[in-house]
Image: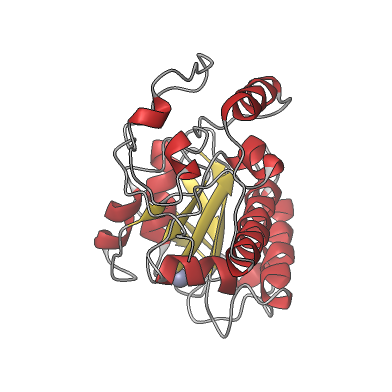
Amino acid sequence: MTSERQSRRDIVHFGKLLYERGYVAATDGNLSVRLDENRILATPTAMSKGAMKPSDLVIVDMEGRRLSGKRNVSSEIGMHLLIYRLRPDIQGIVHAHPPTATGFAASGMALNQPLVCEVVIGLGSIPLAKYGTPGTPELAEGLKPYVPDYDAILMSNHGVVSYGDTLEGAYMKMETVEHFAHIALVAHLLGRQQPLQGRELEKLMLVRSKYQGYRSAAPLPLAVSCNFEGENEGDNNVDRPRPSSITESPSSNRRVTTLRQR
Ligand SMILES: [Zn+2]
């Protein structure tokens, strides 16, 4: 496990990257690291993620009570605690508002089409959680059905949360989500999409299950995602074999919103 000192430096470093890349504005966003089974190191509220010092960070327990630090902890700490509770494998969490992915979240669209092979291997798909008022338990409730099966989630009319077995891994997933959102937008603007399907998707499943260091249970995008109209959800998914490590998601009846061709 990374030392507290290194974790403080990591949060400051990746907070700065979020700010410099324009994934957050003003005092948006929050980051955290699991220090041990009872302590979470997190960013403070009301502070730019581009201007933090290691001493600005706050340590809270698993109930969100402050154990050390002069500042108040992020108002979204409840979302972080939910993810740490549901996913013992997770050590770091990043929440931001990257503009393209947040545009999808503001349009009620999941990023669930298999348009790019690397994204299918790395994240499976990125679902859309229902809206919840920031700083309230409602927000964490909306994420709950997706946390066990996905490593990055779009938050309706809000932003993105991603998490991994290191803070760096969580940050990399945030970059992947925003980059993929940009590609999906360009494909949409070009007026034609060519999602991976059939045999090619099956081969990606195999690569995904063999991927060294890969720990997510996130399923592949549903075959329905290949259907531009988002219809026949069950039909296209009937005979697709799944490796045992990729189980059927409890959220398989999740909201599926696809980009529609003009
Ligand atoms: Zn936010």
Give the image quadrant in which the ligand numbered 1 is located.
bottom left
Report the label total.
0
Q: Residue at x 50, y 16 (%)?
A: 241
Asked if residue 259 shows in the view, the reply is: yes
Residues 113 and 171: in front is: 113
In percent of width and height, residue 201 lies at 61, 29
Left/right of residue 170 with respect to residue 110 in the rendered view = right
Estimate the x, y position of residue 31 in percent, counting from the top left. 56, 61
Chosen colour scheme: secondary structure
Residue 96 picture quarter? bottom right
| Percent position of residue 6, x then y | 74, 52
- Residue 195 lies, with reference to residue 248, above or below; the image says below
**Residue at position x 60%, y 81% in the image:** 48
Q: Along the line of sight, which residue is nearer the eye, 204 or 164?
A: 204
Looking at the picture, how far across and down is residue 35, in whole percent? 58, 45
Q: Is residue 127 above or below residue 121?
A: below
